[in-house]
Amino acid sequence: MTSDTRTLTQTFDRWLTQQIEELSVDTLKEDTVTCTACGKVTGEYIIEYRGQTFRYPAGKAYAFLMFIAQSEGSSL
């Protein structure tokens, strides 16, 4: 892995973490609680959504939170 690739990957990882943190706040109103510390410690985010628990790696956690945020107000 070149230095440029490593830098880009690190920048992307930071961006992804920031997006998950922002979405975790945005989705609170949809009865969703996200353990953002878990992603940093175990590599998986724990998401509590409407009484169900989900464990996802960063990419899938981001997609799931985005899904919840975009489905706001619907009867999922």
Image (cartoon, grey):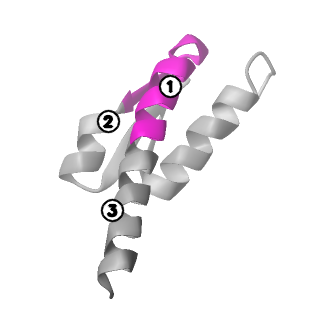
Question: For this view, does 24 lie left or right of residue 36?
Answer: right
Task: Inspect this view and state whether residue 55 appears.
Answer: no
The single residue placed furthest to the left in the displayed view is 41
Three-letter code for the amino acid on which mark 3 is drawn: Gln
x%, y% of residue 61?
Answer: 50, 47
Q: CA distance from mark 1 to mark 2?
A: 18 Å
Q: CA distance from mark 3 to mark 2?
A: 18 Å
Query: Residue beneath label 1, please?
Result: 51
Q: Quadrant of the N terminus?
A: bottom left
> SS class of the residue under badge 3?
helix
Q: Which residues are magenta?
A: 18-34
Frontmost residue, 26 versus 16: 16
Query: Residue beneath label 3, please?
Result: 10
Frontmost residue, 69 versus 48: 69
The single residue placed furthest to the bottom in the displayed view is 1
Label 2: few (<14), some (14–19) or many (≥20) C-alpha neighbours in 10 Å: some
The single residue placed furthest to the right in the displayed view is 74
> SS class of the residue under badge 1?
loop
Three-letter code for the amino acid on which mark 2 is drawn: Thr
x%, y% of residue 13?
Answer: 38, 56
Three-letter code for the amino acid on which mark 1 is drawn: Gly
Task: Place residue 73 in its image quadrant.
Answer: top right
Query: Residue beneath label 2, please?
Result: 36
Disc sitting over residue 18 in the figure: none
Q: Residue at x 56, y 23 (%)?
A: 50
Q: Residue at x 32, y 33 (%)?
A: 35
Q: Residue at x 48, y 38 (%)?
A: 19
